[in-house]
Amino acid sequence: SVMYVSAPVRWNDEIVGVVSVGKPVQSFGQFVEDARARTLWVGVGSALALLVLAVIVSVWLVRPFGLVSDYWRWVRSQPRLSVSRMARRALDALRSGFSEMRDTLTGRNYVADYVQNFTHEVKSPLSAIRGAAELLQEPSMPAEERAHFLTNITRETQRIQEIVDRMMELTALETRRALDRTEPVALGPLLQDIAASARTTASARSVEVRVAIEAQATTEGDPFLLRRAVSNLLDNAIDFSPAGREVVLTLQATSRLARISVRDRGQGIPDYAKDKVFEKFYSLARPHNQKKSTGLGLAFVKEIASLHRGRVELVNGPGGGALATLTVPLAR
């Protein structure tokens, strides 16, 4: 087939003829195919470029939110944290906001839990004080009974004071994100000194305190807090030890960690209490007098361990009794 292009020939506004030019259609085929191919490749290239650009933009926009999501999950798992520096100011501000929000929410729950627990713990001694005070109003009460009730009031008042003091100490620890100051602490002499101080109380209950220094170790920390932590563990072991048995205070070390363990030969931890021993205000009755402590001692030890980048565990020993272990990093 032939493709024609025509144009009229005019003379004095009249068409006097036609000029026609014809060319076989086959001669245009290659030109059309080339143009079609170029158009196709340009279209494919443009689509790929747009796709790559879309992926890059998506990653650029979504990745910071993924980082924030990961950071938020990490924040929820950390008892203490400091906001790390970020390359992007907006993301850094967002992280700071999350940290502040976490602190605020934690603070609200913290206050609510403490008020509830404190109310529960002081209810019993307050009831005892009120009951004794009402009975003391009887004018005919014998002097011996009156002295007995006055002693009860004094004892329960001291218990409330002890709970308040322990709560204030624990609160001061929980609000700290890091130790204010640290220094090298030689753990061997520290344990020997703690054991010497505890032997008076232990001997009154016919319990022997033995120290086993299997390795010399030094950690970086607060000597006062470390002393309080180990003393609490040792006091617990003495309280739960039967008369005539011993409590062993042991110091061991690995390439990176110092391990302080306190072992008693008591009844061990009941199954129902294994997951609760570090909860605030949770306490088991002492075998020798059936009295409970404030339930804040082990929570106090846990906070001290956390501040020293360590951990504390309390499990039943393989041969009976309880085994408390405080692990802290060695000084570099």
Image: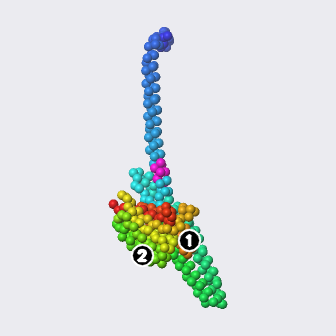
Q: Where's residue 39, x and y in %?
A: 45, 25
User: Please, what is the three-letter code of the amino acid marked with disc 1?
Assistant: Ala
* Label 2 packing within 10 angstroms: few (<14), some (14-19), many (20+): few
Q: Earlier in the sequence, mark 1 or mark 2?
A: 2
Secondary structure state at the residue bearing disc 1: loop
Q: Where's residue 32, x and y in %?
A: 45, 19
User: Is residue 305 depicted above or below 74 in this figure?
Assistant: below
* Label 1 packing within 10 angstroms: few (<14), some (14-19), many (20+): few
* Residue receiving disc 2: 197
Q: Which residues are magenta?
A: 65-72
Which secondary structure type mostly characterizes the magenta part of the structure? helix
User: Is residue 325 depicted above or below 123 in this figure?
Assistant: above
Q: Where's residue 331, x and y in %?
A: 35, 62
Task: Give the residue displayed 44% in from the left and 77% down from the top.
Answer: 200
Q: Residue furthest left?
A: 332
User: Please, what is the three-letter code of the amino acid marked with disc 2?
Assistant: Ser
